[in-house]
Structures are given as structure tokens and as C-alpha cells.
Amino acid sequence: MKLLKEFKEFAVKGNMMDMAIGIIIGAAFNKLVDVLVKQVFLPPLSLLVEGVNLSDKRIILRHEVLNDAGKTIADEVAIGYGAFSEAFLDFLIVGFTIFIIVKFLNRLRAKSQDPKNHTVSTPKDIELLTKLTDLMEEQNKLMKKSK
């Protein structure tokens, strides 16, 4: 019963809803970045490296051994550095894309939280905190004058 009570508190407090919203937005953001990388950034990059297929690149440690009938006795042993290079390049492009998007979103958030910027409506909590800060500064000045 205690577990059920804890789950109810968890769900009612909004933590579960916040998590669900975060997961849904994360999935949509992942799809957005995936399309941006594969449809916008990679096509011009593939023009630069035309004819080069990184996934086929590997260092062969032991060649495939065949018997007289042509059947494989021992498989080829190779280090597939090309697939790793391709995945690493994809990671760098996705990471840089996310960095640019987050930087842009942070700039928008900073503009919206700046009380002196009147082009974007300031959230109420930021307005109230700004007024509170101004009142406290004014009160401190008055107290210093009275001393």
C-alpha cells in the first residue's frame, strides 16, 4: 500500500506528467535533428567525398581461408574502422546540430527573461522578481541615507 501511495503522490505532483512531456518532446526533437542531419547536412558532405564508402573500410587481420571445394574453413578477421568513422562523423554532426539549436533556444529564452527587452513579453514571475529587486535596491538606498 505504501508503494501505491508513493506512486499516487508522484503522479499527482506532476513529476510523471513532466517526464512524459519531456519524453514526447525529446522523441520529436530526435526526429527533427535526424532529418536535419540526413536531409540537409549529409547530402552536400556526400558530394565532397564522392565514391568513398567509409563503411567498407577495414584492416584485415586474417584473410578468409577456403578449402579446395571453395567452402570457408576460417572466416575473415578484420577491424572495421570505416563503420566506426561513419558513426563518429554522424555523432559529431548531430552533436554540433544540437549545440546550435540549444544555443539558439537559450538566446531566445534570455531575451524573454530580460525585463528591459520589450520586444518579447516577459514572463510574470520574472517581472515580479524584477520589481522586487528594484524595491529592495530602493530600500537599501534609503537606509544608507538615513545612517
Image: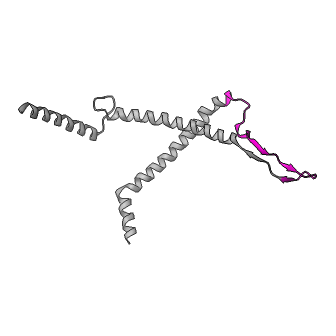
Asked which quadrant contains residue 93, the reply is top right
User: Which residue sits at x=21%, y=36%?
Assistant: 133
User: Which residue sits at x=73%, y=38%?
Assistant: 57
Position of the C terminus, as image quadrant, is top left
Q: Position of residue 8 (x, y in %)?
A: 37, 64
Q: Position of residue 102 (x, y in %)?
A: 45, 37
Position of the N terminus, as image quadrant, is bottom left
130 on left or right of 38: left
Stretch of the chain drawn in magenta: 46-73
Asked which quadrant contains residue 138, the reply is top left
User: Which residue sits at x=28%, y=32%?
Assistant: 115
Residue 50, magenta (yes or no): yes
Residue 101, magenta (yes or no): no
Looking at the image, residue 92 lies above or below residue 68: above
7 on left or right of 135: right
Furthest residue toward bottom: 1
Q: How is the image coloured?
A: one colour
Q: Position of residue 135 (x, y in %)?
A: 16, 36
Furthest residue toward left: 146
Residue closest to the eye, 103 or 77? 77
128 on left or right of 60: left
Q: Position of residue 13 (x, y in %)?
A: 34, 57
So how many labels did they put on this image?
A: 0
Furthest residue toward top: 48
Looking at the image, residue 76 lies above or below residue 135: below
Residue closest to the eye, 10 or 92? 92
Furthest residue toward right: 68
User: Which residue sits at x=36%, y=67%?
Assistant: 5
145 on left or right of 65: left
Looking at the image, residue 131 lies above or below residue 62: above
